[in-house]
Image (cartoon, rainbow, N blue to C red):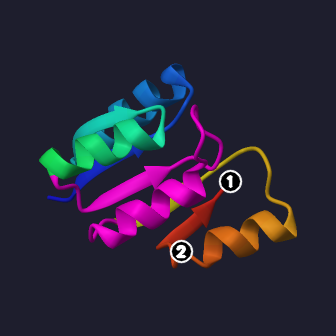
Amino acid sequence: MAKILIVEDELVIALDMADQLRDAGFEVVGYAASVDGAVSIAKFAKPDVAIVDIHLHGELDGIEGAKLLRRAGVKVIFSSAWDLRKEVVSRAMSVEPVALSR
């Protein structure tokens, strides 16, 4: 069973996503609204995959956070309903995510 970390700044969305993933049989190891929180959880929980929103609380966005998670061996799926301009998508794809979803 894959261990999943949710990195999402909207609590309602994070909780709904966690419920849906658990119902589908995945193990959700936690959720964070910022890169700092995500990196902290990832150090201890060792997720296989992180579902990362591009816009997060704090100084770093989800793309920068994904770079840190990838360095720790965590696969990344981007999920964002916001800014999918060409330059944002290009930055996101440079992280080599598993997927980019809207």
* Residue 70 in view here: yes
The location of residue 33, given as percent across then percent down, is 47, 31
Given the image, on which type of amino acid does mark 2 rest? Val
In this image, 61 relative to 85: left or right? left
* Residue 20 in view here: no
* Residue 85 on the magenta span: no
**Residue 54, which numbered label?**
none
Q: Which sits in the foreground, 42 or 3? A: 42
Mark 1 surroundings within 10 Å by alpha-carbon count, few (fewer than 14), some (14 through 19), many (20 or more): few
CA distance for labels 1 and 2: 17 Å
The location of residue 42, given as percent across then percent down, is 25, 50
The residue that mark 1 highlights is 102
Do callouts 1 and 2 mark residues in contact (Cβ within 8 Å)?
A: no
- Element at badge 1? loop
- Element at badge 2? loop
* Picture quadrant where residue 90 is located: bottom right
The residue that mark 2 highlights is 95
Image: 42 above or below 97: above
First reached walking from the N terminus: tag 1 or tag 2? 2
Residue at 30% across, 65% down: 74
The location of residue 17, given as percent across then percent down, is 43, 36
Q: How many labels does the image show?
A: 2
Q: Of circles 1 and 2, which is in front?
A: 2
Given the image, on which type of amino acid does mark 1 rest? Arg
The residue segment tinted magenta is 46-74
* Placement of the N terminus among the 4 image quadrants: bottom left
Residue at 28% across, 50% down: 4
Q: Which sits in the foreground, 81 or 45? A: 45
| Residue at the farthest top position | 12
Residue at 36% across, 36% down: 37
Mark 2 surroundings within 10 Å by alpha-carbon count, few (fewer than 14), some (14 through 19), many (20 or more): some
* Residue 51 on the magenta span: yes
